[in-house]
């Protein structure tokens, strides 16, 4: 009897314990909801928040970083891991460096792309000799299976790796952007003369970026459909060949290196070009001589011309001849000129005054000059204020000046601000010319010393602003550097 009563008491206590445990779990859940409100959010909301946690670009060499989303999110708790794995948008961008992960590249790529499911892949970048990775066959099969979802693809590979990939049939029906960089020359130099055909099926491709060692002939592409092209560290013959291959090109950027001695293709006209940029790069210790191409090209419908890091400004050189051709710039609306270095370029900018007065260039409405010499600046502003045939269409004028006085002939931003206001006011009263509506002065320097401008210096600009002008005087906030704090926004 005593035994039965004891068992009944144990059963009662067990039931009480179960009730209390359930109550404890309920209270604990309520507490966690209060302390950690994210736990009460619906899965769909958490998933959306996760997507906004993605970095714009990897802070390390590739995407495999446990300190960044999406891998970071998977380490918080089991629920977050489940949500992250089941959110395909978190896995639609992958940068993988095979040099760092040769033993795991195939596994990482396969798992990552599987989690993206059937979502279009916004970015896929592979770096390194992928044919040396473990399970290369698995990697290429994964690459082939998901190629139909790529929208943007970047391949930074040795030349011989392209040939390995080319052995596999690939279709890229969604691909719009393609970047190809050869990180090492081929074992057989003659292999650059043969086409790789892996990109023959790219019906939507419009943007192409090709880097050093990759001439156009190396890649079989539907060249006629391309609209935007960048050729980095290209030889002059390759640049001309690229322009010939792409008659529908509207936007092009080159950094042009050595010319072949005696190479003279004659004048090539590209009527479809709307935006053309020449920029400065350095490869194997040599600086680009990008302006050389201007001797051989004509863009009768060009609207935007950026000359960044160019070297020669003398009229007898390519750039001066280009400016003075009546057919070179009749429709150009925006012109940016940035010399290769302030020390080499600023003093020679005075040679540009002649094409500014060319009647064929009256459509130029926006001009940006970097590191102008003081003599040029004064002469330019005087002509602008007094001559009704000088850049008749000019509406926006910007200067980027060196803040430091390392350049004895370059105008400082303070000196420019001091002399420009009166000339701008006079320009706005000229008849037969467009009314100047924007004037910006940016101080470009690696120091944190602010410009020194008095209230008297700024007063004329405040008056111009009240008349509707867009006035900016301060730090160059667009060049990507931490300069000094903005001093004046009038």
Image (spheres, helix red, strand yellow):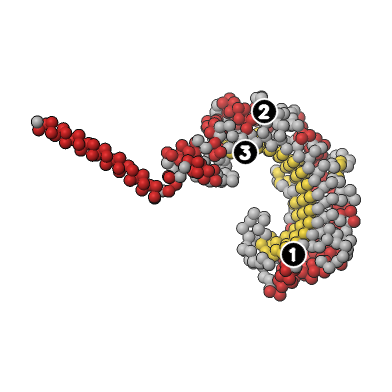
Residue at (79%, 34%) from the top-left corner? 224
Q: Position of residue 358 (x, y in %)?
A: 89, 56
Q: Nearer the viewer, residue 397 or 311?
A: 397
> Crowding near pointer 1: few (<14 within 10 Å), some, many (20+)?
some
Residue at the spot of label 3: 122
Label 3 vs 1, first from the N-terminus: 3
Q: Is residue 443 visible?
A: yes
Quadrant housing residue 191: top right
Secondary structure type for disc 1: loop
User: Is residue 120 found left or right of 34 in the rendered image?
Assistant: right
Residue 357 vs 99, above or below: the answer is below
Residue receiving disc 2: 171
What separation in Å lies between label 3 and label 1 (alpha carbons)?
A: 40 Å
The disc at residue 469 is 1
Write the residue at 82% across / 51% down: 332
Whether pointer 1 and pointer 2 mark residues with C-beta atoms closer than 8 Å, the reply is no
Above or below, comparing residue 360 to residue 379 in the picture: above
- The residues tagged by marks 3 and 2 sit, at their Cα atoms, a distance apart of 16 Å
Question: Between tags 3 and 1, which lies in front?
Answer: 1
Residue 79 at x, y percent in the picture: 43, 39
| Local crowd size for mark 3, using a 10 Å CA cut-off: few (<14), some (14–19), many (≥20) | some
Element under disc 3: loop
Give residue 331's position: percent from left, percent from top.
84, 50
273 horizontally vs 459: left or right: right
Instruction: Specify whether 389 is left or right of 127.
Output: right
């Amino acid at each position: 009897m005593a035994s039965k009563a004891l068992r009944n008491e144990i059963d009662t206590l067990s039931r009480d314990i179960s009730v209390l445990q359930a109550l404890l779990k309920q209270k604990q859940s309520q507490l966690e909801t209060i302390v950690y409100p994210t736990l009460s959010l619906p899965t769909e909301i958490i998933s959306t928040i996760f997507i906004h946690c993605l970095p714009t670009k990897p802070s390390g060499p590739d995407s495999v970083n446990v300190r960044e989303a999406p891998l970071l999110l998977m380490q918080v708790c089991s629920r977050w891991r489940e949500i992250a794995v089941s959110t395909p948008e978190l896995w639609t961008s992958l940068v993988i460096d095979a040099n760092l992960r040769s033993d795991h590249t195939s596994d990482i790529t396969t798992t990552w792309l599987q989690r993206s499911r059937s979502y279009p892949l916004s970015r896929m970048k592979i770096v390194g000799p992928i044919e040396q990775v473990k399970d290369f066959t698995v990697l290429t099969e994964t690459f082939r299976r998901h190629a139909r979802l790529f929208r943007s693809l970047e391949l930074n590979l040795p030349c011989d790796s392209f040939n390995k990939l080319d052995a596999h049939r690939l279709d890229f029906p969604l691909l719009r952007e393609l970047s190809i960089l050869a990180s090492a020359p081929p074992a057989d130099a003659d292999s650059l003369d043969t086409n790789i055909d892996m990109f023959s099926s790219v019906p939507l491709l419009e943007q192409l970026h090709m880097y050093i060692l990759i001439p156009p002939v190396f890649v079989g592409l539907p060249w006629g459909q391309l609209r935007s092209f960048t050729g980095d560290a290209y030889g002059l013959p390759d640049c001309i060949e690229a322009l010939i291959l792409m008659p529908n090109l509207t936007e092009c950027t080159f950094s042009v290196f050595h010319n072949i001695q005696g190479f003279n293709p004659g004048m090539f006209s590209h009527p479809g070009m709307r935006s053309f940029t020449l920029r400065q790069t350095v490869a194997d210790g040599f600086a680009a001589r990008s302006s050389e191409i201007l001797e051989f090209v004509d863009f009768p419908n060009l609207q935007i011309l950026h000359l960044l890091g160019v070297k020669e400004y003398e009229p007898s050189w390519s750039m001066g001849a280009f400016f003075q051709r009546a057919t070179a710039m009749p429709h150009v609306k925006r012109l940016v000129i940035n010399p290769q270095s302030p020390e080499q370029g600023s003093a020679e900018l005075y040679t540009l005054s002649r094409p500014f007065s060319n009647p064929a260039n009256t459509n130029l409405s926006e001009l940006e000059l970097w590191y102008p010499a003081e003599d040029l600046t004064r002469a330019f502003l005087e002509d602008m204020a007094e001559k009704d045939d000088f850049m008749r269409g000019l509406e926006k004028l910007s200067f980027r000046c060196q803040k430091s006085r390392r350049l004895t002939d370059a105008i400082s931003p303070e000196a420019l601000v001091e002399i420009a206001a009166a000339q701008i006011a006079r320009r706005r009263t000229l008849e037969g010319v467009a009314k100047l509506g924007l004037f910006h002065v940016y101080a470009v320097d690696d120091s944190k010393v602010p410009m020194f401008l008095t209230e008297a210096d700024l007063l004329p600009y405040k008056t111009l602003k009240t008349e509707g002008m867009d006035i900016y005087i301060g730090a160059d906030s667009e060049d990507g550097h931490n300069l000094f704090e903005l001093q004046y926004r009038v």
